[in-house]
Image (cartoon, rainbow, N blue to C red):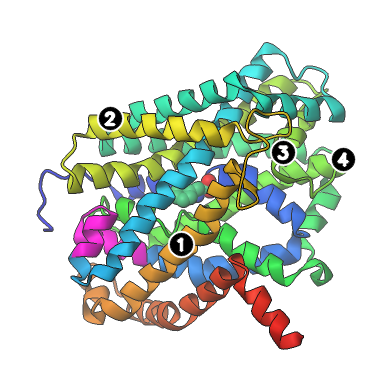
Amino acid sequence: MKNNKRREGFSSGLAAFFATLGSAVGLGNIWKFPYVVGENGGAAFLLVYFACIILVGLPVMVSEFYIGRKTRKNIMGAVKELTTKKRWRSIGIIGILAAYFIMFFYTGVAGWVYSYVFKILRGDFNGATAQSVQQQFTNTTAGPVAPIVWQIIVLTVVSVILIGGVKKGIERITKTLMPVLFILIIVCDIRALTLPGVKESFSFLFKPDFSHLTSQGILIAMGLAFFKLSLGMGTMVTYGSYFTEEDNMFGTAAKVAISDTIVSLLVGIAVFSAVFSFNMEASSGPGLLFMTIPLVFSKIPFGKFLLIAFFVLASIAATTATISMFEVLIAYYTEQKGASRKKAVILNAIVIAFIGAFSTLSVGETSLLSGVTIFGKGIFDIFDFLSSNILLPVGGLLMALLVGYIAPKEDIKRELSNNGKLKIANIIDFYYFVLRYISPILLVIVFLSSVGVLEKIIKLITG
Ligand code: PHE
C-alpha cells in the first residue's frame, strides 16, 4: 500500500506546505472572515476563534494528515483501509457530499470575485461612492447570465490546473501563487494603514469587549475555524496522502494554521479600516468585502492598480481553495472508480456548473430564483448551511473519533514521528489527549447548536 509507485505526490515539504496553505486560504479569509467577525462584534469573537483553531482545528488537521499519509489513499479508500467496519464509510460519503455542496456555492462567489477584476479594469469603479459600490454588488449577483458565465470560467480554470496533475498542476500553481498573494495583501494593507479609520479598526479587531459575545457567536467561531482550515471533508486527508515520508505533519499543520490566521487578520485590517473610514456597517453581511475594498482604493494615486491587485489576490485564493475541494472528488473517482483524471475532472465540472447555476441564481432580491426556498432557506444558503454547519463538523468529529479511538496508538506515534525520526513524543501525547477528550466534546456542542438542538435543550433547562 505504501509503495503505490504510480501514485503522484508533492515533491517536498515546502510544496506540501504551499498546497495545504492554498487550500486553507480562500474566500473564507477574504469574504467570510471579515463579515462574520463584523457581525459578531470583533475582538472577543476572535479570541474564541483562536481557541477553536488550537483545540479543535489543529488536532483534526493532524488527524486528517495521519489518515492520508498512512494509507496513501483518497478519503473513501483511506477509511476503508483503516477499518473494515462499514459504518465508518459514512466519513467518505460525508466528505464527497460536502465537496459537492461547497463547490456549488463557492464557485459562484469565486465567479463574483473574478468578475470584479474585469469590472475594475473596465472602469466600473472609477469615482466609487458608498452608494455606487452597493449598487455594483447588487448588479453583480442579479444576473441571470453573467454570474453563471463567471462560475463556468472559474470551473474551467480549476479544471485545467487539475488535469495537469498533483505536481504539475496543484504543486506548481500553489508554489507560484501563494507568495504573490502574501505580497499583494501587504501592499494593500500599507494603503489601508493610511486611512483615517485604521485606529478604530485595530481596536475593533484587537480590543475585546465581551459584552458583544453571544453563545451563538461561540458556535459560529467553531464553524468558521472548520471552514477556514478546510477540515471535515477529507481535503487534508487527500493532500496528506501526497506528503513525503519526511514531512513533519505537526509542523505543517501549525505553519498552515498560523499563516492562514495572519492572512485573515491582514484582510480584516483592510476591510475594517474602510468600514470605519467611510461610516459603513461592520455587520453588513456577505457583501461586505465587495462594498468596502473598492472604497479603500478610490481617490488615491495608483488606487486602481491596488484595487486590481486585491481582487487578483482574492481570485488566487479562491482558485487554490477550489482546487483542493475538487481534488477530493478527483482522487475518489480515479482511485475508487477507475476513471481517468481527465474524465473525472470534466464530468464533475459539468455537474457542478449545472447544479451550481441554481445556487448562484438564487442570490440577491432581484435574481431569477430568489423566491425559491427549501426548508425556508434559499438554494445558495441551503448548500452553505448543510455543508459548513452539518457535514463538516460531523465529518470532523467522526475523523477525530476514528483516529482517537480506533486507530492503534502505536501506529499513530510511529506515523506522526516519521518512524521515530522526529523527537516529539510529548507533543504526540498531548495531541492524543486533546483529540480524544477535548475536540470531540467541543464538536458535539457545535453540531447540536447548528441544528438548533442545543438551544432547545438550554430553553428546556432554563424554562
Ligand atoms: N478553506 C477554504 C477557505 O477558507 C474553504 C474550504 C473548505 C476549502 C473546505 C476546502 C475544504 O476559503
Q: Which residue is mark 4?
A: 277
Of label 1 and label 2, which has the lower sequence position? 2
Query: What secondary structure is the stretch in magenta mostly built from?
Result: helix
Name the front one of labels 3 and 4.
3
| Contact flag, marks 1 and 2 (Cβ < 8 Å) | no
Distance CA(mark 3)–CA(mark 1): 31 Å
Magenta stretch containing residue 344, yes or no?
no
Distance CA(mark 2)–CA(mark 4): 44 Å
Q: Nearer the viewer, residue 68 or 92?
A: 92
Determine whether, in the image, residue 248 is placed left or right of residue 4: right
Q: Please tell me the numbered disc located at residue 287.
A: 3
Does 144 sit above or below residue 175? above
Distance CA(mark 3)–CA(mark 4): 17 Å
Name the front one of labels 3 and 2.
3
| Amino acid bearing label 3 | Gly
Q: Which residue is mark 2?
A: 164
Q: Nearer the viewer, residue 159 or 49?
A: 159
Q: Could you tell me which secondary element the residue under label 4 belongs to?
A: helix
State the image quarter where residue 337 is shown. Answer: top left
Q: Which residue is mark 1?
A: 254
Q: Residue 360, position in %: x, y?
A: 57, 33
Q: Residue 192, position in %: x, y?
A: 76, 38
- Range drawn in magenta: 63-80
Is residue 11 among the parts visible in the rendering?
A: no
